[in-house]
Image (tube, rainbow, N blue to C red):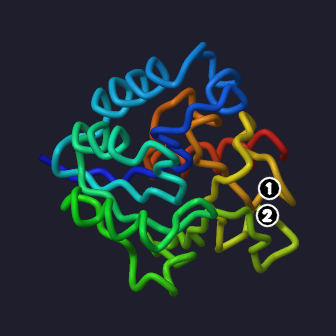
Amino acid sequence: MIEVIWFTSDLHFGHNKPFLFEPRGFTEQWSMMSTIIQNWNSVVQPNDTVYNLGDIALTDINSAITFLHTLNGNQIWLRGNHDTDNKITLITQECPRIKLLAGLESSYATVLKDGKWRFYLSHYPTKVGNYDDKALCKTWCLCGHTHTQDKWHDFSDNCYHVEMDAHNCYPVSIDQIKEDIRNKHLTKT
């Protein structure tokens, strides 16, 4: 079976705040978390890799850990604004398929190369790109944080949002991201 690479951010498991779950179409956090798990496991296979770009859990960490154990795949976690040292330690100890990228202090961003593609992975939207012509852009920022439903929100066309909000509570595959980028530029020409 071929391993697929996926991206997501802002699961916010255990975060019981209406401003988070209501825009996603839910009336309470438990149905949101159950839907995320169902959606996730319908596309992510056990041997796939998921880059989780931060804010995995808030507040009710024990419930979050219970839900995290049910997710398929191996996660590489980059730190988000709600990811404290204590939370990171607890989650990575209790959930062995979730690994924090690098050390606690240096895991806010990284670059992932995939063939000719280069992705700057960060919880935060970051202006990247090295060409005025976005069709020739070699670096794309994959991010979360803003809870936008628009995957193209922020700065310019070289920023692509992977958070749950922008993908109907599903992770998004690297192949889908590449296709979306190609299609966006085809429609502009």
Q: Position of residue 16 (x, y in %)?
A: 57, 31
First in sequence, mark 1 or 2: give its number: 2
Quadrant of residue 138 in the image? bottom right
Image coordinates of residue 176 in percent, x first then y, are 50, 43
Circles 1 and 2: CB distance less than 8 Å?
A: yes
State the residue at coordinates (34%, 70%).
89
- Crowding at dot 2, Cα within 10 Å, few <14 / some 14-19 / many 20+, comes out as some
Q: Which residue is mark 2?
A: 134
User: Residue 77: where, in percent of width, then height?
Assistant: 41, 64
Q: Classify mark 2: helix, strand or loop.
A: helix
Q: Which residue is mark 1?
A: 157
Which of the 4 quarters of the picture holds residue 75?
Answer: bottom left
Q: Amino acid at mark 1?
A: Asp
Residue most extreme to the left: 1
- Give me the residue at 40% from left, 85% from top: 103
Looking at this view, is 24 or 86 the one in front? 86
Residue at position x 38%, y 26% in the image:
39
| Amino acid tagged 2 | Lys
